[in-house]
Image (cartoon, rainbow, N blue to C red):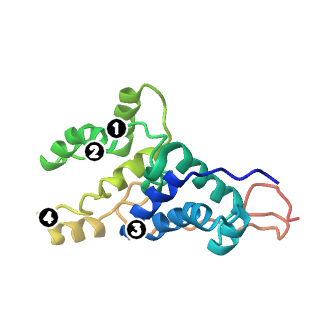
Amino acid sequence: MRRPIAFSKSHLHSLEDLIQEKWSIGEFERFQCVWLRVALDLSPEQIATGLGWHIVSVRRVQEGFARRGPEIFSAKAKGGRHHQNLSLEEELSFLAPFLDRARRGELSTAKEIRTAYEMRIGRKVTKSTIYRMLARHDWRKIAPRPRHPKQDPAAAAAFKKTRRNNSGSPGTGKQPTKAKASSPNVSRRGKGRPHQ
């Protein structure tokens, strides 16, 4: 079994000053890891059982308190954007020209943005990197209208009626039908391929 960390009376006095602090749940549990060891001389195994933690986590908090003092209780949790290509502010400044183009009514495609992004960071990235960045900044896909707002519906209907068939002459607008396979052993997937 590992030898527990030795704490002095000065550690106990510094902890007693902190008892009345307002803590979040995680901060209070870290405080309890150390306080139960210093004040009540409980082993890390007993503290871990009482808090529902792993023994290694309890020891890690106790070692952190021995090295850094009370700041360990309010330490920020690990995590975050450690592998980012650009910070959020840099992404905003990168997207600003595309936003200006969009305000003028011009379209910006993900392909254009990806090319500019790759030039900015100096290496290739996947499409998902660009789509995640656009989603982070609340960009969304807006497609142009399916028809022109000044389109004349009567002219469009007349055009559909006079559509030409494959022979080049005006017709009914129906497509010619394909011939069906004559043999039951021939698949429609390819010529001469038997069913399996």
CA distance for labels 2 and 4: 21 Å
Question: What residue sits right under mark 1 in the picture?
Answer: 112
Question: What residue sits right under mark 3 in the picture?
Answer: 23
Question: What residue sits right under mark 2 in the picture?
Answer: 108
User: Could you tell me which secondary element the residue under label 4 belongs to?
Assistant: loop
Which image quadrant: the N terminus?
A: bottom right
Q: Earlier in the sequence, mark 4 or mark 1?
A: 1
Question: In the rendered view, would you say 173 is above or below 123?
Answer: below
Would you say 87 lies left or right of 129 here? left
- Residue depicted at x 39% and y 38%: 114
The kind of residue on which mark 2 rests is Ser
Q: Find the residue positioned furthest to the front.
A: 9
Which image quadrant: the C terminus?
A: bottom right
Picture coordinates of residue 13, whole percent (x, y): 46, 58
- For label 2, the crowd category at 10 Å Cα-Cα, with few meaning under 14, some 14 to 19 and many 20 or more, is some
Q: Earlier in the sequence, mark 2 or mark 4?
A: 2
User: Could you tell me which secondary element the residue under label 3 belongs to?
Assistant: loop
> Camera-side residue: 146 or 34?
34
Callout 1–callout 3 Cβ contact below 8 Å: no
Label 4 or label 1, whichever lies nearer to me, is 1
Question: What residue sits right under mark 4 in the picture?
Answer: 149
Picture quadrant of residue 142: bottom left
